[in-house]
Image (tube, rainbow, N blue to C red):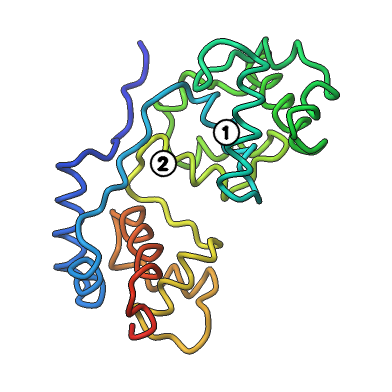
Amino acid sequence: MPKPARVRLTRRLLDQAQNELAAADAKMAAVIEQVGPCTMLPRREGTHFGHLVRNIVYQQLSGGAAATIHGRFAERLGGDPQAPHPDAVLALDEASMRACGLSSAKARAIRDLAQHVVDGRLPIESLDTLDDQAVIDALVPVRGIGPWTAQMFLMFRLGRPDVLPVLDLGVRKGAQRIYRTRALPDAARLEKIARNWRPWASVASWYCWRVLDLDDAGGW
């Protein structure tokens, strides 16, 4: 019998998360009031494979440049740009991928991802059924996918509610402003700060990113 899908953030759960975070943490409550409702609903279009390919393409690039390269690559593969097929990726040689604007490292990473899917090492279609750590463990053996990318996949594709990306610079900077820490919180310090965020660390992390966008962010 297949395992049931794990909890995925919905509008109702986001409302619940905001209410419970505000009740548990006065400083986070002030941020929620200033920023407004969380809009971090998971991206449902396309496939898990297509989402991961896009993540690899976008790594360390500006949005415009990444979108152009991703568009060229998707056109070369044919079919639905949000749902490329791993076999179509493996049918391209590295030179063809480089011609789309991909670096050698990214071309090899995308091919490695496709190979992991094709040979079954990465159970791409059943990631929804795995717990958070199992998803990370399944993804990080792929070239070009580290813990941070795996956590972003958990948050923005699978909609997992309690992911804490302790090494994300934006989350750390946001937490520094919200809680007025002298130094940028390291992983251990952020874990302590986040005790009041559980089981909604993903939503609290989103507010850490968003507080940096406020006009008066320097006042936090």
Q: Is residue 37 above or below residue 89?
A: below
Instruction: Indicate which disc residue 54 carries.
Output: 1
Is 168 placed above or below 60 here?
below
Residue at 20 percent of width and 55 percent of height = 37
Asked where in the image residue 200 lies, by quadrant, the reply is: bottom left
Q: Give the CA distance from mark 2 to mark 1.
A: 12 Å
Q: Is residue 219 left or right of residue 20?
A: right
Residue type of the residue flagged with mark 1:
Arg
Left or right position of 28 against 76? left
Question: In which image quadrant can residue 22 be found?
Answer: bottom left
Amino acid carrying label 2: it is Phe
Considering every residue shown, the one lying at the far right of the view is 95
Give the quarter of the figure containing the C terminus: bottom left
Find residue 156 and name its label.
2
Residue depicted at x 20% and y 61%: 36
**In this rendering, would 21 be left or right of 86?**
left
Quarter of the image where the N terminus is located:
top left
Crowd rating for badge 2 (residues with CA inside 10 Å; few <14, some 14–19, many 20+): some
Mark 1 and mark 2 in contact (Cβ < 8 Å)? Answer: no
Residue in the picture at 36% in, 42% down? 160
Give the percent coordinates (x, y) of residue 9: 27, 40
Of the residues tagged 2 and 1, which is closer to the observer? Answer: 1
